[in-house]
Amino acid sequence: MTGLDFDVAHLLAGMLVLISFLELYQDRLYALLNVFALHALVLALSVAWQAFIQDAPHLYVTAALALVFKAVIIPVALHRIIVRLGIHREIENVVGVGPAMLTGMALVALSMVVMLRVTQEADPLAREDLAFALSVILLGLLMMVTRRNAVSQVVGFMSLENGLVLAATGAKGMPLVVEISVAFSILIAFIVIGIFLFRIRERFDTVDLQALDRFRGERR
Amino acid sequence: MRADALAAVLLIPAFAAALLAAMPGYRITARINIAAALATFISAVSLFFSRPQPGAYLLVDDLNSTFIVLTTFVGFTTSVFSASYIGHELETGRLTPTFLRFYHAMYQVLMFAMNLALVANNIGVMWVAIELSTLTTVLMVGIYRTHEALEAAWKYFILGSVGIALALFGTILVYMAARPVVGEGLDAMVWTTLIMRAGAFDPALLNVAFVFLLLGYGTKVGLAPLHAWLPDAHAEGPTPISAVLSGLLLNVALYALLRFKMLLAVNPAALAPGPLMVTLGLISLVFAAFMLYRRRDIKRLFAYSSIEHMGIITFAFGMGGPLANFAALLHMTMHSLTKSAIFFAVGHVAQVKGTQRIADMGGLTETNPALGWGLILGVVAIAGMPPLGIFTSEFLVVSSTFARSPGLAVILVFGILVGFAALFLRLNTIAFGEPRGSTAKAEASYVPMFVHFALVFLAGIYIPPALVAWFENVAKLLG
């Protein structure tokens, strides 16, 4: 492996982590969707680069899927849903940018410590990729926990899943990556359709029916 | 002939799903559903006699044929129950014919997904199958489209997705650990290859992988801090689905976990997976036992009881050793049979009373003797009273634990007793006293319920030596 191969892969994976941080402090839904589209775009580039340096043409399918489905179709669809549900002006109750960012940094440090320590024998590129991937996964989880709005929870889930794809493509020669990424796309499509059909706006964190009625207003 | 039985276990549900999606009419589709489930069960049993060679994708061995037979059997009896349950739902208009068609197709897709997860020899295929089973059950939980049902489905969806995402990361790590030893490509995901070479894997990587797999598949097992989806999903979906969720799907997720536990057990330098499972199991048991007291919804009550029993089973598998594994296998079988039978009874009770609130039920033994006594029998069985099967298996779990670590056994017994008391407290209101709520007669099919109870009763008194030998064999395999 040449130095350039490694550097570009490293750069792209590192960018994914940075963009995950960007997602973490977006408090407007439109902006969040734009940042997510960027996230998916960088993922597509990263996967395509992996396909190129590993000489694994089937990974281009995964890259194309990330580009078309996650960077274009899903953000556009969610954009429309936000307009339809009339929540585009909503400002989210994020936990607070400061604490969220600090927690995020702690999570990245944690994943670096864990993954770099346990993968000492693996090849350096896969090592770094796994460490970055785990950071992206944990940041996605953090986002799902700190958001209250169903749309941004889904965005959190999708960036978590981007981390998984990064890990799967970084593991050289892993079979079934394309199948798994297709399976995930189906899952996400279902979630998005679910939001649209059932007008799910908020995370449901109460079982009090009256509170639910109040939360969900006009829904049927 | 050899590979045919295995193919049938997968293809029958797949074709039936396609057929049922296309066919209108309730009576005929319900019968096709039953027939397909029966055919799947028969081909699963025939796997005992002719077993195909393990391939790169599919595998049949002693461990999973036990699970497949149990899964297809309960799948079959539940389809019989489902026919009468769904008939009633159509009459009351809770389900429309379109949704019914969808429901039947999804039922068969779920059977397909569970069977595929069980026979998968490839950890990637296993993951995809479990994801598919999550998707289908989410759709079925939300099928009534009430606020509560959608809420439950959404919660299940999000938590289940996070769970399977973590499990996928664990699976990728296992591949990473296998790659330097086995080589790149498909072989490094084939379980039979992995287990042979696992001794040489990097132990640190395996450890981290197992933690992710435990959290991921543990979410689907319903282990305690990760259980939040389970009671809602059980309470709001159609009751046949609650029966299948509790009786089967939790087992399938546990099975996936066991496969990975076996991998770690082969590697001497890797961390012992047992204590982690023991801890999670005990937490689930004690937590769920206390939660049983505050339940007002009958299906939620038994959902928490499922968490409790999955805790016991995970605990026993975590303890390991021939005796504890034997007890865990027996307990899993008994729990599947009993819990699905209880849900059969509960489904009809809820239909008769028109509600799931425990406070609105009462005097069932007077108004609907067969249902009332069936439910009593079920609760007596699930609480672990002798001479029923769950008593035998719980006794084995407790006694094998006492011999090895008395401290854990005390917590275990405490949890079981707390749960025991809670169930009887609730049973008293439901079954005896003044009749409350509607007193209409149930048009129920009692056969599946009482067949299950008869099996559980029989197992409490006498387990055939052949079955004992079989379970002992599987228990040894599990290490």
Image (cartoon, coloured by chain):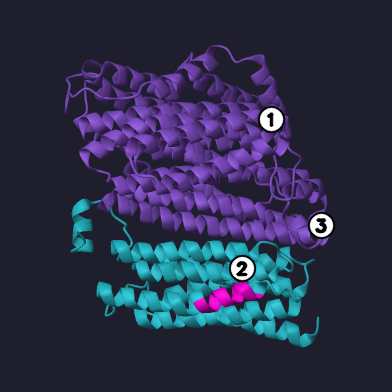
Pointer 2: what residue?
Answer: A111
Query: Which chain is rendered cyan in the image?
Result: A
- At horizontal 50% and vertical 34% (from top left) the residue drawn is B37
Query: Which chain is rendered purple in the image?
Result: B
Pointer 1: what residue?
Answer: B475
Magenta span dominant secondary structure: helix
Where residue B295 sits, quadrant-wise, is top left
- At horizontal 59% and vertical 45% (from top left) the residue drawn is B116
Q: CA separation, marks 2 and 3?
A: 26 Å
Q: Nearer the viewer, mark 2 or mark 3?
A: 3
Callouts 2 and 3 on one subunit: no
Magenta span: A60-68
Mark 3 is surrounded, within 10 Å at the Cα level, by few (under 14), some (14 to 19) or many (20 or more) other residues, namely many
Give the SS element for disc 1: helix
Chain letter for mark 2, please. A
Residue A80 picture location, percent across and down? 33, 77
* Residue B106 in view (yes/no): yes
Callouts 3 and 1 on one subunit: yes
Q: CA separation, marks 3 and 1?
A: 27 Å
Say if B15 sits above or below A195 in the image: above
The amino acid beneath tag 1 is Ala
The amino acid beneath tag 2 is Ser
Pointer 3: what residue?
Answer: B182
Chain letter for mark 1, please. B
